[in-house]
Amino acid sequence: DLQQKNPNKTEAIQKELDKDSFQIYFEEAFPKQSSGFIRAADHINFSSSGSSSQKINISDGNYYVKFEKDSVFGDLPFYGERYSGHSTKNNDRIEFESKPKNYKFSSKTKNNRIQTNISFVTKDLNSTAEEYEVSIKIFENGKANMHISSSNRSGMGFKGKLDFVEK
């Protein structure tokens, strides 16, 4: 049981999440697997980076979601399909910087492990026509899973860690 092995780490993570600001860095991206995406991905050599069309290593980038007081900032890669003809200047990015709508933050114990859930809605930094629904789960070991749904693009999943957690 992780909590018994390292209760200090669990406490440190909970204290970090209780602060007004914290950041999550992402190391892996999980594009939605549609037939169009898979056809396009067949022409990309993902294996040289230890990636595949299902899991893309993004650890060499500085991809994050940061919470500061009542605002949220995000800079993430996008791999997938656009659903509408509307385009932004950064079609290969998911970027946001705003006071989120419908912000929810809760922690619960599940199977003797603490899990923190965060969800919110935010607009794309480069397009007022695009909105993201974001759902994040942070586990007691500091690892995080995030899913982003868009009004104009296919969904994406990400895995990462709170920035103060040792790699």
Image: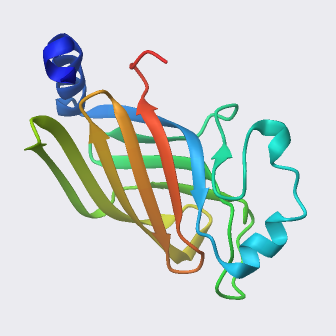
In percent of width and height, residue 97 lies at 47, 53
Relative vertical location of residue 87 with respect to residue 55 in this rendering, above or below: below
x 37%, y 34%: residue: 143
Q: How many marks?
A: 0
In percent of width and height, residue 58 lies at 66, 40
In percent of width and height, residue 50 lies at 74, 38
In percent of width and height, residue 108 lies at 10, 45
x 15%, y 36%: residue: 114
Relative vertical location of residue 19 with respect to residue 39 in this rendering, above or below: above
Would you identify the image quadrant in which residue 24 lies? top left
Extreme bottom residue here?
85
Left or right: 79 as drawn, with respect to 132: right
Would you identify the image quadrant in which residue 9 lies? top left
Relative vertical location of residue 68 with respect to residue 133 in this rendering, above or below: above
Image quadrant occupied by the N terminus: top left
Q: Nearer the viewer, residue 96 or 92?
A: 92
Relative vertical location of residue 127 with respect to residue 70 in this rendering, above or below: below
Identify the coloring.
rainbow
x 49%, y 18%: residue: 167
Left or right: 41 as drawn, with respect to 116: right
Q: Nearer the viewer, residue 148 or 87?
A: 148
Left or right: 149 as drawn, with respect to 20: right
Q: Nearer the viewer, residue 72 or 119?
A: 119
Extreme front residue here?
1
x 16%, y 21%: residue: 3
Left or right: 113 as drawn, with respect to 146: left
